[in-house]
């Protein structure tokens, strides 16, 4: 398993597939068994950092695109990884989840104050992300469209 440099990325890709399709309609015990199997593979990896980096990229895509089958399973996986890696390694991943919770709350408050998320016939949605915790480089300069300046 450790003779191939791509193994950590393949396991992260498999994990992503589980979170987008594979865990659908499984009961909690089966989900836990699958996550335990992934973590057991992770424990055998020499390239743990490579796995964590790939897993973080896939997780960011799932969170921003809202394609994850189960947030509870995502949180369970993070707890399992935290046991194996420690708090510091998993801290950025946990912050990503907290950002999504905060973003959902801010959008809910915005919709409540404005009577919806539609402004001048434009549906408005935004995510608030903590700089340095998401696996993306420098954020582009934000230029607000004229139609949304009122918001």
Image: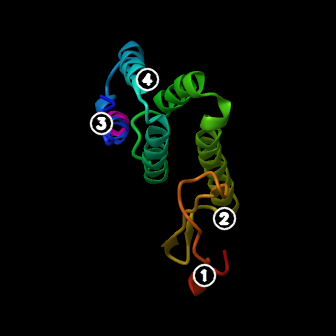
Relative horizontal placement of residue 21, taking residue 140 as reference (left or right)? left
Query: Closer to the N terminus: mark 1 or mark 3?
Result: 3
Look at the numbered disc 3 and give the secondary structure of its residue: helix
| Residue at 53% over, 60% down | 136
Report how far apart the C-alphas of labels 3 and 2 lie in the structure: 35 Å
Q: Report which residue position mark 4 lands on.
A: 39
Measured as percent of width and height from the top left, residue 129 is found at: 63, 56
Q: Which residue is mark 1?
A: 143
Q: Which residue is mark 2?
A: 114
Tags 1 and 3 in contact by the CB under 8 Å rule?
no
Residue drawn at 61 percent across, 36 percent down: 89
Q: Disc 4 vs disc 1: which is toward the camera?
A: 4
Q: Is residue 7 magenta?
A: no
Q: Which residues are magenta?
A: 14-21
Report the colour scheme. rainbow
Dot 1: element: loop
Tell me where residue 151 appears, x and y as whole percent: 66, 74
């Amino acid at each position: 398993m450790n003779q191939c440099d791509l193994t950590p990325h393949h396991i992260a890709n498999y994990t992503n597939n589980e979170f987008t399709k594979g865990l659908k309609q499984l009961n909690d015990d089966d989900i836990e068994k699958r996550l335990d199997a992934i973590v057991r593979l992770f424990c055998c990896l020499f390239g743990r950092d490579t796995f964590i980096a790939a897993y973080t990229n896939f997780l960011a895509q799932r969170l921003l695109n809202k394609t994850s089958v189960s947030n509870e399973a995502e949180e369970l996986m993070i707890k399992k990884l935290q046991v194996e890696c420690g708090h510091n390694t998993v801290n950025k991943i946990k912050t990503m989840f907290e950002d999504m919770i905060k973003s959902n709350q801010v959008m809910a408050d915005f919709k409540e104050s404005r009577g919806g998320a539609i402004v001048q016939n434009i549906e408005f949605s935004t995510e608030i992300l903590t700089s340095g915790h998401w696996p993306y480089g420098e954020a582009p300069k934000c230029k607000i469209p004229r139609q949304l300046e009122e918001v």
